[in-house]
Amino acid sequence: MSKASGPANPEPLMIAAKSVSEAYARTLLHIMSHPGKEIAPLVLTIEGFDQGYDIPEDLKVRTALDNLLKAKKYRDVENVAYTIFPQRLWTMAQGDRAKLFEFYRMAFPAYRAANPRLNGRGLYFERLMMYGRGPCDGNQLEWILSQYESRSGVRRSMLQATTFDPERDHNGTARLGFPCLQHVSFIPVKAGLVANAFYATQQLFDKAYGNYLGLAELAAFMAHEMGIPLARLNVTIGVAKLERITKTDSAMKPLIEAARACVAPPAPAAQRPSPSLQLAAQPA
């Protein structure tokens, strides 16, 4: 793979969406309809989150992508999202974050052992709550929340966490699959919580949707613990790449159709004629 395969000086692509599904659909359709296999950089801003901290999705897009991932022998969307936020453990914890962290500490060795090739260097949620050094025994999320809860007017630049560690990740290996997500921040505003994330690179086919979903679930968790709504998720990707499937693969057709339906404007409601028009249409 060449060191640079995109335009010489690309303009940023900005996509605004009302759901993670729409964000993925618009990104996919853009790269399918433009030359090349990269978007550099890509900036997504997603709103439309439920007040109850549920993450709305278009099930047709999600199902079409999961079916394609299964056919191509890649991990499904939930599996990818779980690397960023373990939603099932949060459900088991029943709103108790101490239990969530305890459950994850207990489970992480099994996660790593189950797939040492993919998980051997760590997982994103593990880096966020088991970084290896720092306050709260390296639990960056707990430190952010404890500082936010301890007083009003907390410095907002304090509310950030990193997954990249130069000591472990500045590595000369030609391909290093982890970590692509580098950094997250959680900014309270009047409307609620705005979460921000930065990726150096991202695989669009098999990782992007799960990444967006996992980040949204992580942001919803943080908003819940802060006692405010989740207002927005912003994701900046240095280079978004479509590398693990070709644009001409016929298996892409159901996903592309679902993506088009997701972003299509709603059909206009049928207008009933006014009473005056109905009377005018009647014979004298």
Image (cartoon, rainbow, N blue to C red):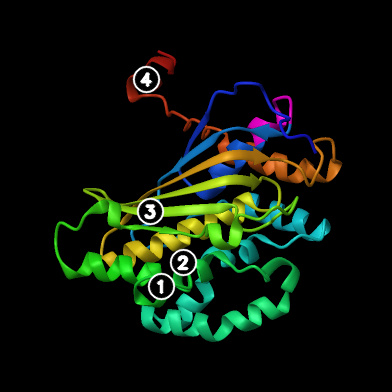
Helix, strand or loop under label 3: strand
For the N terminus, the quadrant is top right
**Residue in the picture at 70% in, 80% down:** 113
Relative to 229, does residue 96 appear above or below in the rendering? below
Numbered badge on residue 185: 3
Relative to 91, does residue 226 appear above or below in the rendering? above
Q: Which amino acid does label 4 sit on?
A: Leu
**Residue in the picture at 64% in, 60% down:** 77
Work out whether mark 2 precedes mark 3 in sequence or the reverse, and give the earlier one. 2
Give the magenta-colored segment's residue range: 29-36
Question: Which residue in the protein does label 1 denote?
Answer: 139
Discs 4, 3 touching: Cβ within 8 Å: no
Looking at the rendered image, the disc whose residue lies closer to the viewer, 4 or 3, is: 3
Question: Which residue in the protein does label 4 denote?
Answer: 279
Q: Which amino acid does label 2 sit on?
A: Leu
Work out whether mark 1 precedes mark 3 in sequence or the reverse, and give the earlier one. 1
